[in-house]
Amino acid sequence: MDLRQRILNAYEAKEGSQRQLAKRFKVSLSFGRDLMRHYRATGTVQPKPHGGGTVAKLGQEHLPIVAVLVQAQPDALLAELCERFCQQTGITDYAKHWGIETLFGIFKSRGFCLESTHLSDGERLNKLLALLSLVLCWIFLTGEWLHQLKPLVVKKHGRRAKSLFRYGFDHLRHIVLNLEHKGDQFSEALQFLFCT
């Protein structure tokens, strides 16, 4: 029986309050409240249909190919899987899309906050993107170097505890915020800028 239906059945049988049922079924209180509100409005606990969004680049016919690629190398990075998928199917836009999304995700929210600059002048934006690209390379190379010195822990799911980007970013941020005590480490980290 579906979890939604079990929660509804328990609620209608007065087996506890919404808070108690949320705890019992290991869901958030807001999930339980929204479920009850949805049930009262529609008479069903079935989820709402998908509201649209971006059209998937991959169809049902591509899922077996993805499954084979993942089974062949379960520890492969997403970028590696995308590249192999493109080689087999010829859908090259998918790999480009992944790379662009990752880059702008980093620039927008993972430490760079590009949108908060509110730049609209094309020339200034080009200079800023060039600088951010250089810094991104610096951070990534620092993360790779740190990973060679002290490898990141690999979790049960087979992925590292954090990305090489986050590893390098956290290290450089710590140095810059404590520059008066970390001058030697800063000089060492600057060496990566000369090989980018």
Image (cartoon, rainbow, N blue to C red):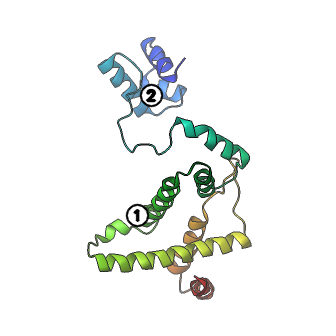
Q: On the image, numbered disc 1 is attached to which residue?
A: 108
Work out whether 95 lies above or below 4.
Answer: below
Work out whether 19 lies above or below 193.
Answer: above
Amino acid type at image mark 1: Lys
Residue 126 in picture, x, y percent from top left: 36, 77
Question: Which residue is painted at 52% across and 23% down in the image?
Answer: 3
Q: Residues within 10 Å of mark 2 (few under 14, many from 20)?
A: some
Question: Which residue is painted at 68% across and 42% down in the image?
Answer: 68
Q: Sequence-wise, which precedes: disc 2 or disc 1?
A: 2
Residue located farthest toward the front when viewing the structure as drawn: 90
Dot 1 lies on which element? helix
Amino acid type at image mark 2: Arg
Q: Closest to the observer: 116 or 52?
A: 52
Q: Are marks 2 and 1 in contact (CB under 8 Å)?
A: no
Q: On the image, numbered disc 2 is attached to which residue?
A: 19
Question: Which residue is painted at 58% across and 71% down in the image?
Answer: 140
